[in-house]
Image (cartoon, rainbow, N blue to C red):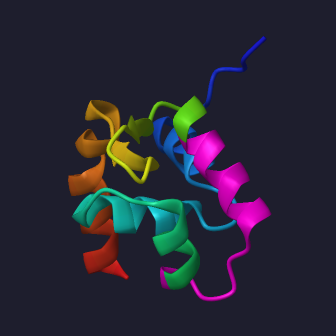
Amino acid sequence: MEEKETCPAQALLKMLSGKWKPEIFRLAMDHPLRFSSLLRDIPGANKQSLAVALKELEETGLLEKTTIKIKPLHIEYYLTERGRSLIPVLQQLEHLG
């Protein structure tokens, strides 16, 4: 049973909390993501922690996983409509920081 958040921003912060999630989201704002490129683009990231973060971002509805059936077969991650709606919010936070 989900608890209601007392502050509207609390749900957003909870969705993006965790290792690598904010960085993954920031990179997804610019272009579709591939797992191998994330390993290169995020210093210190490892396969397991990236896989967990990507799965959690999918479960919250911020990222969508798409299989590209062109050889070689690969998977790309895109921001969903819900994820794209958060871009202005995060850009404002960047300007404040």
**Camera-side residue: 14 or 79?**
79
Say if 82 sits above or below 43 in the image.
above
**Camera-side residue: 18 or 45?**
45
Query: In the rendered structure, does residue 73 fall within the stretch colored magenta?
Result: no
x, y percent for residue 91: 25, 66
Could you tell me which residue is drawn at 25 percent across and 78 percent down? Answer: 95
Figure quadrant of the N terminus: top right
Could you tell me which residue is drawn at 40 percent across and 49 percent down? Answer: 76
Could you tell me which residue is drawn at 64 percent across and 41 percent down? Answer: 56
Say if 5 sits above or below 52 in the image.
above
- What secondary structure is the stretch in magenta mostly built from? helix
Q: Which residues are magenta?
A: 41-57
Residue 82 left/right relative to 30: right
Q: Quadrant of residue 19?
A: bottom right
**Camera-side residue: 33 or 56?**
33
Could you tell me which residue is drawn at 35 percent across and 59 percent down? Answer: 28
Say if 83 sits above or below 61 in the image.
below
x, y percent for residue 7: 54, 37
x, y percent for residue 67: 42, 37
x, y percent for residue 14: 62, 46
Q: Quadrant of residue 46?
A: bottom right
Query: In the rendered structure, does residue 43 fall within the stretch colored magenta?
Result: yes
Residue 16 left/right relative to 44: left
Residue 25 left/right relative to 59: left
Residue 77 left/right relative to 92: right
